[in-house]
Amino acid sequence: MGTAAGAGALRLPGLHGYAVEFSPYCPGRVACAAAQYYGMAGCGTLAVLEQNEAGIVLLKSFDWNDGLFDVTWSENNENVLITCSGDGSVQIWDMAKTKGPLQVYKEHTLEAYSVDWSQTRGEQLVVSGSWDQTAKLWDPAVGKSLCTFKGHEGVIYSTIWSPHIPGCFASASGDQTLRIWDVKTPGVKLVIPAHQAEVLSCDWCKYDENLLVTGAVDCSLKGWDLRNIRQPVFVLLGHTYAIRRVKFSPFHATILASCSYDFTVRYSIFS
């Protein structure tokens, strides 16, 4: 399936990558969720890659009958991953198995676009976000969703757990808002009118439990302090097209990276 493209690259012919995630267990191991035809039609593939002395090699791949848009690693099993896809389903995969998903959840009524496994380790919970404007809470050991979170008035592009606060996650949406949720309560905890454009991505700072960042179609990155949401704590400009994804550095408290439809990746320092 994969073809070598130099020591630092591996081509996946006919596929377009939508998300990559490093394994929390194995240095150099990466999972990639991919789709044919830019996710507008065709099938999807989960590819697990690893870098060794020979370069980047394909360890395992699984095919799905619709495009795969996001991937997250299990926090309690180094071989288990979860993906989400254009048919609205969420899939659990085990690299130790030869083929097929361990479990498929089909509850979202439109594309499932985002999935994240809680990092707090005290709970094994997964959150998914969909174009049906809902987020759903899952326990991988249970065959159906535990709860559905409603309130967004546009598609949900991004869902991410707080690395600090158990049971707390954020969602970014086409309704121009960033929302904070708590799994112990059914309603939204906080609504932030983050941009005057669709919000495509959000992330939680690894060093500050109150700080999040959003990236949007308006080409800007904005930082938000949950203790005072009247205005952003920083605004970063520079991209010339919509910002597809943004991530805080896990190693530096004031560095983040963003990628955009302007075909650039930018590192930014904020204060």
Image: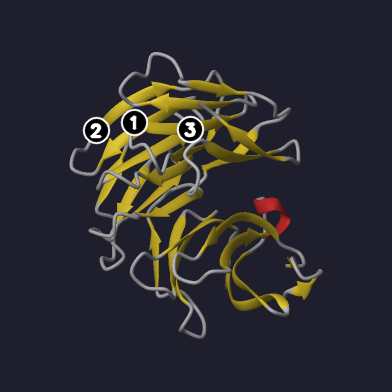
Marks 1,2: beta carbons within 8 A: yes
Total residue callouts:
3
Q: Residues within 10 Å of mark 1 (few under 14, many from 20)?
A: few
Compare marks 1 and 3 and give the one earlier in the sequence. Answer: 1
- The Cα atoms of the two marked residues, 1 and 3, are separated by 20 Å
Residue at position x 41%, y 37% in the image: 171
Compare marks 1 and 2 and give the one earlier in the sequence. Answer: 1
Q: Is residue 223 above or below residue 157?
A: above
What amino acid type is highlighted by mark number 2?
Answer: Gly
Residue placed most toward the observer, 210 or 188: 210
Residue placed most toward the observer, 205 or 64: 205
* Left or right: 128 in relation to 264: left
Q: Residues within 10 Å of mark 3 (few under 14, many from 20)?
A: many
What amino acid type is highlighted by mark number 1?
Answer: Gly
Residue 182, quarter of picture: top left
- In the rendering, at what x and y percent does residue 67 appear? 60, 58
Q: Which residue is mark 3?
A: 213
- In the rendering, at what x and y percent does residue 107 appear? 37, 54
Marks 3,2: beta carbons within 8 A: no
Residue 228, quarter of picture: top left
Residue at position x 19%, y 38% in the image: 185
- Number of the front mark, 3 or 2: 3
Q: Which residue is mark 1?
A: 151
What amino acid type is highlighted by mark number 3?
Answer: Val
Q: Residues within 10 Å of mark 2 (few under 14, many from 20)?
A: some
- In the rendering, at what x and y percent does residue 50 appear? 61, 73
Marks 1,3: beta carbons within 8 A: no
Q: Which residue is mark 2?
A: 187
